[in-house]
């Protein structure tokens, strides 16, 4: 069973103040969801690399 690949769209909106803070939170959550999906599905792309070094924090 193959899983459907994600569809990605983006819009650029420039706002500030309270509306900007709400948009930044919304965008951060969307990015987090996308990164989590990629982490959960990296094996499906054959991108696994056991020799890769962990990024320094």
Image: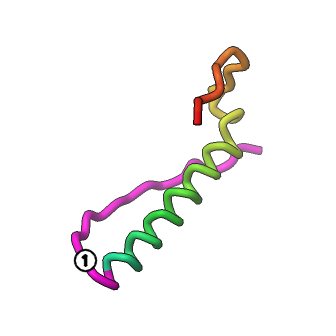
Residue 19 to residue 36: above or below: below
Q: Is residue 33 above or below residue 2?
A: below
Q: Quadrant of residue 12?
A: bottom left
Instruction: Count every numbered label the image shows and give the total.
Output: 1
Looking at the image, residue 54 lies above or below residue 42: above
- Left/right placement of residue 8 relative to residue 51 reads left
Disc 1 designates what residue?
Answer: 16
Quadrant housing residue 50: top right
Q: Is residue 55 magenta?
A: no
Q: Report x, y in % for residue 5.
A: 57, 48
User: If the image is split into quadrants, where does the C terminus sit?
Assistant: top right
Please identify the residue farthest to the front as the structure is shown. 57
In percent of width and height, residue 23 lies at 38, 75
Q: Residues in magenta?
A: 1-19
Q: Residue at x 69, y 14 (%)?
A: 51
Residue furthest to the left in view is 14
The residue lying at 54 percent from left, 52 percent from top is: 6
Q: Secondary structure at mark 1?
A: loop
Left or right placement of residue 13 versus residue 43 in this view: left
- Residue at x 68%, y 42% (from the top left corner): 41
Above/below status of 56 relative to 53 = below
Q: Give x and y (percent) for residue 33.
A: 58, 59
């Amino acid at each position: 069973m193959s899983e459907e690949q994600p569809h990605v769209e983006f819009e650029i909106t420039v706002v500030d103040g309270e509306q900007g803070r709400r948009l930044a939170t919304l965008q951060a959550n969307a990015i987090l969801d996308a990164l989590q999906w990629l982490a959960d599905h990296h094996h499906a792309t054959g991108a696994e690399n056991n020799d890769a070094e962990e990024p320094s924090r």
